[in-house]
Structures are given as structure tokens and as C-alpha cells.
Image: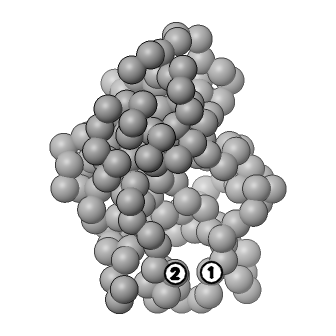
């Protein structure tokens, strides 16, 4: 795993957010891309299922953000999420995502967002691992954390994101 040490402004904001939560996770900047779960797993040298994909959706009628923290290979069953949120959802575009999180797609961390996100769901499959890897503000910055810390860090609800498939 080749890494450089200088953190961008976005990666540093994630490092600061982790520190403010009392976590001693270290943001690392990798020389290879971690934009996709598969790329991240190959670069880091972990199982693709240990990669936390931070996916932003929005509710169709109220335009509220929905954050889904999905295990690398898993696909989101939108109907399952809609049943928890109480309305239809749609994938958020790049502008909405940046407006809510202050991060670009491909580097969205599970926390440290610009706006409060009320609907946060954690894929139960992530909790099968002791530790997981999440994006840290840029497409090649990541951090490792204990999977159980995702709960405290995000106040998310653990669900099966693929139920019904």
C-alpha cells in the first residue's frame, strides 16, 4: 500500500472530525485510486466487503438527504430504504451531494458532513468484520476503523440494505 503523507483540505477535515469524536483513526492518502470499492480493496489489500461505500440518495418529495453506508460488493435495494424513510428515494446528483456533504462523489466519508443527515443506514454486512475502510474526503484518501465505531460515529441504523432481492 503506497501512501503519501500530505492531507488535502478535504482529507484533513475528515481527520479533524475523527479526532473530535475521540477516535484515533489515521487518514492515509494512497498513490492509487480508491474511487470504487474494488479499486480500494485492491490498493489497501483487504476484502472488498470491508470497504464502506458512502452513498447519498435524496427523498423525492421532501429533498432530504439519505446516507447509506454499504459493504463494497452490496447493491442497495431502494425499496428497503424507502420503507425505512417513508417516501421514495432517488440517487443524488453530484451538486446535491457536494451541497450536503461538502465532498465529491468517490470520496464521501461516513461522517464530517456540512449538513446534518437525519437518515443514515449502515449495511449489517459491514459489522461482520472487526475493521472496515472508509473514504476520507478524496478519491484516494481512506481511513480504517472498527466496524462497531460506525454506529457511534454516525448514529446510523443497522439494516439489511439488500432485503427482498
Q: Position of residue 84 (x, y in %)?
A: 45, 83
Q: Crowding near pointer 2: few (<14 within 10 Å), some, many (20+)?
A: some
Most foreground residue, 68 or 31:
31
**Mark 2 highlights which residue?**
78
Q: Position of residue 69 (x, y in %)?
A: 44, 58
Q: Position of residue 77 (x, y in %)?
A: 46, 80
**Mark 1 highlights which residue?**
89
Q: Quadrant of residue 92?
A: bottom right
Q: Which residue is painted at 61% across and 56% down in the image?
A: 116
Q: Is residue 18 above or below residue 150?
A: above
Check the picture and name the quadrant holding the C terminus. bottom left
Q: Which residue is painted at 52% across and 12% down in the image?
A: 4
Labels 1 & 2 near each other (Cβ < 8 A): yes
Residue 14 seen by the camera: no
Please report whichever mark, 1 or 2, sits nearer to the chain's N-terminal start: 2
Q: Which residue is painted at 44% across and 16% down in the image?
A: 2
Q: Is residue 120 above or below residue 2?
A: below
Q: Quadrant of residue 143?
A: top left
Q: Is residue 19 above or below residue 2?
A: below
Residue extending farthest to the top is 5
Q: Crowding near pointer 1: few (<14 within 10 Å), some, many (20+)?
A: many
Most foreground residue, 158 or 163:
163
Amino acid at each position: 500500500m503506497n501512501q503519501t503523507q500530505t492531507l488535502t483540505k478535504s482529507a484533513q477535515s475528515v481527520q479533524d472530525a475523527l479526532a473530535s469524536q475521540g477516535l484515533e483513526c489515521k487518514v492515509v492518502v494512497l498513490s492509487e485510486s480508491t474511487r470504487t470499492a474494488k479499486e480500494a480493496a485492491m490498493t489497501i489489500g483487504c476484502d472488498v466487503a470491508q470497504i464502506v461505500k458512502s452513498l447519498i440518495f435524496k427523498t423525492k418529495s421532501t429533498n432530504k438527504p439519505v446516507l447509506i453506508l454499504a459493504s463494497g460488493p452490496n447493491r442497495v435495494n431502494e425499496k428497503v430504504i424507502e420503507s425505512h424513510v417513508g417516501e421514495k428515494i432517488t440517487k443524488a446528483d453530484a451538486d446535491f451531494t457536494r451541497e450536503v456533504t461538502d465532498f465529491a462523489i468517490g470520496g464521501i466519508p461516513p461522517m464530517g458532513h456540512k449538513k446534518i443527515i437525519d437518515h443514515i443506514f449502515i449495511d449489517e454486512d459491514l459489522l461482520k468484520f472487526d475493521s472496515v475502510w472508509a473514504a476520507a474526503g478524496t478519491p484516494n484518501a481512506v481511513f480504517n476503523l472498527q466496524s462497531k465505531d460506525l454506529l457511534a460515529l454516525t448514529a446510523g441504523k443497522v439494516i439489511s440494505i439488500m432485503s427482498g432481492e
